[in-house]
Amino acid sequence: MSNLYSLLAAGFPEDSQAACLILPDGGTWSYGDIERASGRLANLIVALGLRPGDRVAAQVEKTPAALVLYLAALRAGMVFLPLNPAYRRHEIDYFLADAKPGLFVCRPQARALAAAAARQAGVAHLLELDDAGRGSLIDAAAPQADDFKTVARRGDDLAAILYTSGTTGRSKGAMLSHANLAVNAQTLHDYWRFEPGDVLLHMLPIFHVHGLFVACHCALLNGSAMLFEPKFDARRALALLPHATVFMGVPTYYVRLLQAPGLTAAAVRHMRLFVSGSAPLLRETFDAFRARTGHTILERYGMTEGGMFTSNPYAGERRGGTVGLPLPGTAVRIVDDKGMACAAGAIGNIQVKGDNVFVGYWQMPEKTRAEFTADGWFKTGDVGALSADGYLSISGRAKDLVISGGLNVYPKEIEDMIDALPGVAESAVIGLPHADFGEAVTAVVVRQQNPAGAALTEAAILAALRGELAAFKLPKRVHLVDALPRNAMGKVQKNVLREQYSPAG
């Protein structure tokens, strides 16, 4: 039996009344509740006529019922397709037409648009799940039996399809197998030393690898309770941290926690582990959090196409500015544009290999072949360097590389220098079309809300950089803004910045 659900369920507590999800209103879903509810939904999915391997798509808010729907899809042998509630009609049209799910679960307020998209894509069944976890999905499942025999699956059978953000070109559906997800869940559970009594403060969305797979899988495999919050709120987090032992967040969460006066060493004395991922963690944030709380954030690195690849160690040096060491069972290498190995410390293309790496892109065999090397390594599209002792540092996305006058400029090098200047909150460096240089290095800078930030000017930033950077790396322009555009996981949307500041924009 290689079904991922069977692996997770093996970690459930013997006491079925043990808490699994603790809600903001004080309500609790026990592990027994989760098993019974997922059994009813699995029976419903089968009763609707779906067969193992069919897709179940869900565009709903984070609720216990939404998590249970995922578990039910696993149990029934289906392929789960979580969709960001922020997606609009044209995006949903594409996802449904591409994945062709047998069941699409939507929010009631989106019913009209969802119905039109479902009809156009030939989706047989459309049910609703509202933001409180009620709706026609739950009503239809109510008469179904609680018991369900989990469907046997092979390790290479698909468990989920997650669409990449699609910032450039057509969105790609990353196919993740039961084995891909199981290997990563077990590795992270062991590497981060989950233990009896751990409680996870869960404030991440669950349409993404970080919240749905990394966080939930670790907790479920450990039989842990999750403080299951609909979204991140710094005040709420500070109120709940004394009742938790593990917290997983994106860098923005840590920035906001640091802005809250209640973040003290005493407030987090019960915590065992803080994990950050999904976007780069500024060294300033890393250092400030350690100084304020006594806790060193554990930063890790991964992506939709394979879960987690590297992690700073649980016991050992958690090195700021790096995403740590290759996880057990995962290999990482750095190569140049010709595929030759780079020396320690040299920036190159990051490639990975391991049983957690995805099967390929849904219905895109040519794209899948293009993203793997002849010897089976996945080209992540990220650039970075490995230190002599194996720590990986990320320099950015290959597509974000700026080539100015024929010379490579790595944005992170310049961003790190700008971020270190007094009054700078954060920055993003992009390349814009330029008649002479091909691309012009351009910086977009967010000022701190203090006198030093108010005093920042473009001229002052350029003057500070001029003596530190080679001329070809020096930004041609610096734009001062109040905030950088980010996606739902906190990643800076450089494509939006390129469109905004392009000479033709």
Image: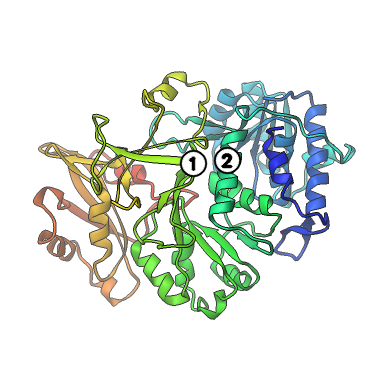
Q: Position of residue 436 (x, y in %)?
A: 10, 37
Residue 489 is left or right of residue 447, and the answer is right
Category of crowding for the residue at label 1, using alpha-carbon neighbours closer than 10 angstroms: few (below 14), some (14–19), many (at least 20) = few
Residue 149 is left or right of residue 466, and the answer is right
Query: What whole-number distance in Å separates the C-alpha atoms at marks 2 and 1?
Result: 9 Å
Q: Position of residue 120 (x, y in %)?
A: 62, 22
Callout 2 touching callout 1 (CB < 8 Å): yes
Q: Amino acid at mark 2?
A: Val
Q: Position of residue 36 (x, y in %)?
A: 83, 45
- Element class at badge 1: loop
What numbered label is drawn on residue 429?
A: none
Please give the name of the residue rendered at 80% of the width and 42% of the height, measured from the top-left corner: 138
What numbered label is drawn on residue 329?
A: 1
Q: Amino acid at mark 1?
A: Gly
Q: Which residue is mark 2?
A: 183
Residue 249 is left or right of residue 394, and the answer is right
Q: Position of residue 455 (x, y in %)?
A: 23, 72
Q: Residue furthest bottom?
A: 266
Above/below status of 387 relative to 298: above
Q: Judge depth for marks 2 and 1 and give the one in front.
A: 1
Look at the image and tell me whether residue 34 can be seen: yes
Q: Quadrant of residue 334?
A: top left
